[in-house]
Amino acid sequence: QVQVMESGGGLVQPGGSLILSCAVSGTPLTEVAMAWYRQAPGKQREFVANILRRGAISYDASVRGRFTISRDTAKNMGYLQMNSLKSEDTAVYYCKIVPFSEGVFWGQGTQVTVSS
């Protein structure tokens, strides 16, 4: 029943901004941990950021200070605000939902391309 869908990706020039959305159905965001991962061509999927139970937030060093992870429990939506984008941020970005009860759920990903 849990479904995850990312949106908001696109083409942006270096230094620009994008906000990614993670729509979640089947479980309230008040009862899950949420994370963002990314995967560049030819590379393994890597951790970007997460927000855990009680709101603890972590970022990979490569995005700390530029990206902000957040959630809107009223809308049951998660977000990744990305500022000061660099070419090395180019990847498919995935939302990962981990309910406190059980299971792990991934979206299909959204493409972010940073290029001049």
Image (tube, rainbow, N blue to C red):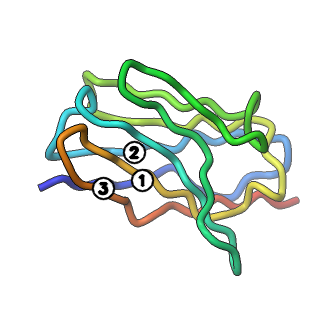
Label 1: element kind: strand
Q: Which residue is mark 3?
A: 104
Of all residues, the one furthest to the bottom in this rendering is: 42
In this picture, is 29 found above or below 37?
above
Q: How many residues crowd around disc 1 within 10 Å: few (fewer than 14), some, or many (20 or more)? A: many
Q: From the viewer's perspective, is 15 left or right of 109?
A: right
Residue at x 55% of width, y 57% of height: 93
Q: Are marks 2 and 1 in contact (CB under 8 Å)?
A: yes
In this picture, is 74 found above or below 2?
above
Residue at x 34% of width, y 47% of height: 97
Q: How many residues crowd around disc 2 within 10 Å: few (fewer than 14), some, or many (20 or more)? A: many
The circle drawn on residue 22 is: 2
Q: Which residue is mark 1?
A: 6
Give whichever of discs 3 and 1 has the lower sequence position: 1
How far apart marks 3 and 1 lie (CA) works out to: 15 Å
How far apart marks 3 and 2 lie (CA) works out to: 15 Å
Label 3: element kind: loop
